[in-house]
Structures are given as structure tokens and as C-alpha cells.
Image (cartoon, rainbow, N blue to C red):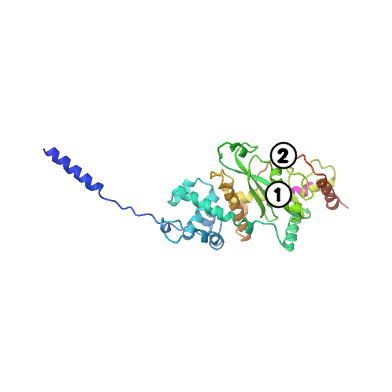
Amino acid sequence: MEDLVLINNINREIAELQDVHIHIPKRYIRDMQNPIEYYNNFEFKRRYRFDKRTVNDVLLPMVNGHLEKPSNRGLPLPPMLCLLITLRYYATGNYQIVSADLRGVSQSSISRCIKLISTLFAHNLPNYIRFPVDEERKQESQRQFYRIAHFPRVTGCIDCTHISIKSPGGNMAEVYRNRKRYFSINVQVVGGPNLEIFDIVARWPGREHDSMIFNNSAVKAKFEAGNLTGHLLGDSGYPCLPYLMTPLHNPRTNAEERYNRSHIRTRNSVERLFGVWKQRFPCLRRQLCNKLETVPYIIVACAVLHNISIQERDILGEDERQVEAVEPNIQVRNENNVGNAVRRILIEEYFTEL
């Protein structure tokens, strides 16, 4: 009888506990540690790759109007925190769940932040990635190129670099496997004399060759139409065209040797650009594990931020300016007779000793 009473009492207590609703307060993101206030400028830049001034005055206004919510319903991430989460991802390339654990938010929230902020930055491409427009700036850019190794009338230096991605899966996955046997996006960049980016194409899979990407680019169309003048400098992966100068395969005279040396030294600026760009944003050096449709936005966003850093003189230390090691490109055999003639005239006019 006593055992039955004890059992009934226990069952009654369990029932009462089940009726009790324990309220666990939600964690407000705005109450978390503020990196702007917590870190000094040196430590902040190490983690986010930009000065506090650039983040507050330039980057935040670019995204602020698109992220503000009319209410705190659902506890949305503040625009500054969303921006810093994305910059930290660019600066580390870590798995999103690592950032989620550090910031006390879900991995899906981190993913949405990165996609949204990257898209907003990428949409600013026309404002920050472009060739010099007015004649004075064009001439100044050519003078700066000329100072490197005395190559005349250089408008830009062109090359491609592979950004590693995870296997996209599906029937088309193998088109993203490049000649080095890893999955990638082959990104075409035209660089300026100060390591700025004049043009970028970030949509082609890693299997595609540099010359094919160039043949289908807006840059070629602009040169063909006469909207861009001067010379592009490319490696032997490109055909020699009237406006695209490539090195000679077998230089035989002193003038041809001087042409090759000047060409290589000047075109090296785009290799240095890749080194600086990937050093500032290590996510580009590591495998991007984001969804395939998000990857081009991340690449272009990092290009926009690269140009902003140059424009704002918010650069990294000189010891961090590393040059990317590049393997020799595949030779292109479809030489252009008109291009060869223009190159020959250029050599005779500028590289032959009097």
C-alpha cells in the first residue's frame, strides 16, 4: 500500500514538472562583443584585412541600406556584424561552422551573410573595376607601365588564375577539373600598373583555356571595336593580335631579346597582382566550399575590395606582398599574321639600338 502511494506521488510530481515551461532567454547578437571596440586597429586589420576607417566609412555604407530591418523580429544580424562575418571569411577561408561557433549564430546564418554581402559587393563592380576613362588617366597609366621596363603604349596586362572549388557534383562536374586535376574556376584578370584590377571574368570552369575565355570576353570586343586602344600584354597562352602582344618563342636578335625581357618584366605586374590579391583574401588560395552559384560573387567581391584597398591606400605590409608561382602556359599555335606584323614593327621601332 505504501509503495502504491509513493508511486502515485512520483507520478504526480512528474506531471507537475511537465506542465512547467522553462523560459530560456534568446541571445541578442547586439549584446555580443563588438570587434570595432574590442580590437585596436592593428589587431582589427590582421583579422579583417581593412582599417576600421575603411570598414566604417566605405564598406558599411555600401551594404547598410540593403540589410536594415524595420524591426527586431527574428533577431536579425546587425549590418556591421554581417559585414564583419563576411570579411573574416574572406580573410581566413575557414569552414562556415567555425565562424558560426565563434559568433554564436547558426551556420545557415553565416552562409546567408556571405552570399548577401558578396552579392552586394559584386554589384558594385562597374564603380570600382574599370579601365581609365578620361584621356589624362589613360596616358598616366601607360606612362606608369612604361617606367617598369620601357614597353610602349601598354593598356593592361592579362592573365588567368585558377580559384579552387569543391566538386560541384552532377553530370557537369568534370568540366570544372583543370589540367592540374583539381576543380576550379578559371578567372581572367586584366591588371594595371599599380596592381589594380581593370577587368575580371569569373564564370568559366577550370577546364577552359585562357585563350578561349579571352575570345569570348568583353575586353576583346572592346579592342576589336576600337573602344580600347594600346596594347594588352599576355603570355604564350594567347595568340599574337594587333592589340595583344605576346613574347617571341625563339628570339634570334638582340632587339628580339630586349623585346622579350621588357615584355616579361612588364607583364609580371599581373602575377604580382594575383599574389597580393590572394594574400589579402586567403579564401581565394584555399578551396571555396560554397555553392557553385555563390562562388563567382565571392571572387568578384574580393576583386572589388582589392581595388577599394588601393583607392583608399589601405594596403597590407610589404612583407605580405607575395608573388604567385605560375607554371608556363600552354603554347597557342593560331598565330595572327597581322598581329605578328604589328609586333615586328614594334620591335624595330622601340627595341632596335640606333
Residue drawn at x 24%, y 47% is 17
Q: Is residue 118 magenta?
A: no
Percent position (x, y) of residue 270? 69, 50
Q: Which residue is identified by label 1?
A: 158
Image quarter for residue 169? Answer: top right
User: Can you name the residue that lies furthest to the left here?
Assistant: 1
Q: In 3D space, how far apart are the residues under numbered discs 1 and 2 (Cα atoms)?
A: 15 Å
Look at label 1 and name its amino acid: Ile
Position of 63 relative to 332 (above/below)? below
- Secondary structure mainly formed by the magenta segment: helix
Image quadrant where one finds the N terminus: top left
Left or right of 149? Residue 201 is: left
What is the crowding at mark 1: few (fewer than 14 residues within 10 Å), some, or many (at least 20)?
Answer: many
Residue drawn at x 82%, y 49% is 342
What is the magenta range?
Answer: 260-267
Label placed on residue 330 = 2
Asked if residue 46 can be seen in this view, the reply is no
Percent position (x, y) of residue 108? 46, 48
Look at label 2 and name its amino acid: Ile
Asked if residue 291 can be seen in this view, the reply is yes
Element class at badge 1: strand
Percent position (x, y) of residue 90? 55, 50
